[in-house]
Image: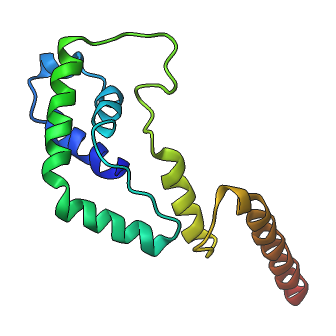
Amino acid sequence: MEPLVEQEVKRQISQLAPSAIRSVNPSDVVAYALNFLPALYATTEEGWTWQQARAQKELQGQISEAVCQGLMVVHQSPQRSESRLYSAEDSLFDAQKSLKELSICLGAPNLTWGSLVPTVKRALLQAAQQAIHQASRSA
């Protein structure tokens, strides 16, 4: 649900007046909206893809409404706090996006945070072995 809500927040914020945009923290709107939407869990890539498609098809109206409500609430009472869990500039989803990119780069479609270090170690070892092999062939 998070990527769809983040996308909708960006879309709706782009339609606001510049003065209104300055007083709205997109992360606050995302958090607000997510609290009013059903959670969609998945344990596989296929399940995640299915849930995303389902949400886009069946829940887009609810997503738009929750984001609209979130924008109104956050705009009317913006809360400034020094103890944020993340900075306003950071995306809530950067870590998951990075893991997905790494899974593609490493050719490891089932990459998880738990398997990341061993997978990177294996990839580095393979690259080193290939470099040694190529160096010995050219010598």
Of all residues, the one furthest to the bottom in this rendering is 137
Specify the color scheme: rainbow
Quadrant hosting residue 122: bottom right
Rendered residue at 81%/64% (across/down): 121
Q: Position of residue 107 (x, y in %)?
A: 61, 76
Name the one closer to the observer, 48 or 97: 48
Q: Residue at x 15, y 44 (%)?
A: 64
**Drawn side of residue 89 relative to residue 72, left or right:** right
Instruction: Locate residue 53 relative to residue 129 in the image: left or right.
Output: left
| 88 is higher (above) or lower (below) than 78 | below
Residue displayed at 17% across by 13% down: 76
Q: Quadrant of residue 28?
A: top left
Query: How many marks are shown on the rendered structure?
Result: 0
Quadrant position of the C terminus in the picture: bottom right
> Residue 75 occupies which quadrant of the picture?
top left
Q: Nearer the viewer, residue 29 or 136?
A: 29
Residue 126: image location, x then y, percent? 80, 76
What residue do we see at 43% from left, 71% from top? 47
Q: Is residue 73 found left or right of 38 in the rendered image?
A: left
Position in image of residue 118 (x %, y %): 79, 64
Q: In x, y percent, where is residue 30? A: 32, 35
